[in-house]
Amino acid sequence: MSRSENGAAVPRRAPLNRERVLRAAVALADDIGIESLSMRKLAQELGVAPMALYKHVANKEELLDGMVSVIVAEVDPPLPGPDWKNAVRHRILSARQALLRHSWAPRVIESRTQAPPVVLDYMNSLIGMFLAGGLSADLTHHVMHALGSRMWGFTQEVFPTPQPPADPGMRAAMFRQAAERFPHIVAIATVGAHDDASSVGQGCDDQSEFEFALDVLLDGFERLHNEGWRSGVPGNRAAG
């Protein structure tokens, strides 16, 4: 405790360190959005001068790297045991939950030009799970390419679905026109559960779609492993 001019006890502020700066930045981005995050606003949130932050992070890019590290550290550790497929699934779905808590994180992860060590640790652990399950380094190389952003718990859709008009009549007219020109698209778009926040468009349950695709990939990896798949062998399409 310190004392104010009138002698009243004043709680001592926690010392500023790198971890406190990064965690405050993550919380602030959750609150105001990553686009609005700035060193000035972060300094205000911490009650310090902006220059005090630069003792702990060199610049905004280093701050973002550190924020990614904080989020990746929230991912559950690997499950013990020989069931590599379940262990990988659990780890990736845990990563998904971490990124859902911080909706801005996928954009920041994709924007990194160099992976922070904790990100490399996470990727290394996933690779280790496949190798421990008996998959060859050759197959695991292609597995990591196939997983793509899904290893982090998110996917990027190639064609975003436009929001339909709020007016019922206009919405019905839009669907009629779409059904005439794109009947097969409409056929699959009008089935399934609904999730308004889905990254794959209305009419899709984003969590179910993510798990479906993840399971299809994991089943395929297991089949290739059991068949003794090797790159460069006639009949195998992937070569590099």
Image (cartoon, rainbow, N blue to C red):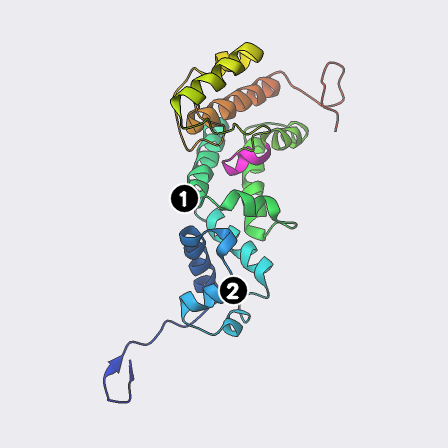
- Residue at the (55%, 44%) spot, across then down: 107
The span shown in magenta is 148-154
Q: Nearer the viewer, residue 103 or 175?
A: 175
Describe the element under mark 2 as helix, strand or loop.
helix
Q: What's under tag 1, amino acid-wise?
A: Arg
Which quadrant of the figure contains the N terminus?
bottom left
Residue 228 included in the magenta stretch of the image: no
Q: Nearer the viewer, residue 34 or 208?
A: 34
Looking at the image, residue 218 lies above or below residue 156: above
- Residue at the (61%, 49%) spot, across then down: 112
Which quadrant of the figure contains the C terminus?
top right
Q: Is residue 76 visible?
A: no
Give the overall secondary structure of the magenta segment. helix
Q: What's under tag 2, amino acid-wise?
A: Met
Q: Which sits earlier in the primary sequence, circle 1 or circle 2?
A: 2
Residue 151 included in the magenta stretch of the image: yes
Which residue is under mark 1? 101
Q: Nearer the viewer, residue 90 or 204?
A: 204
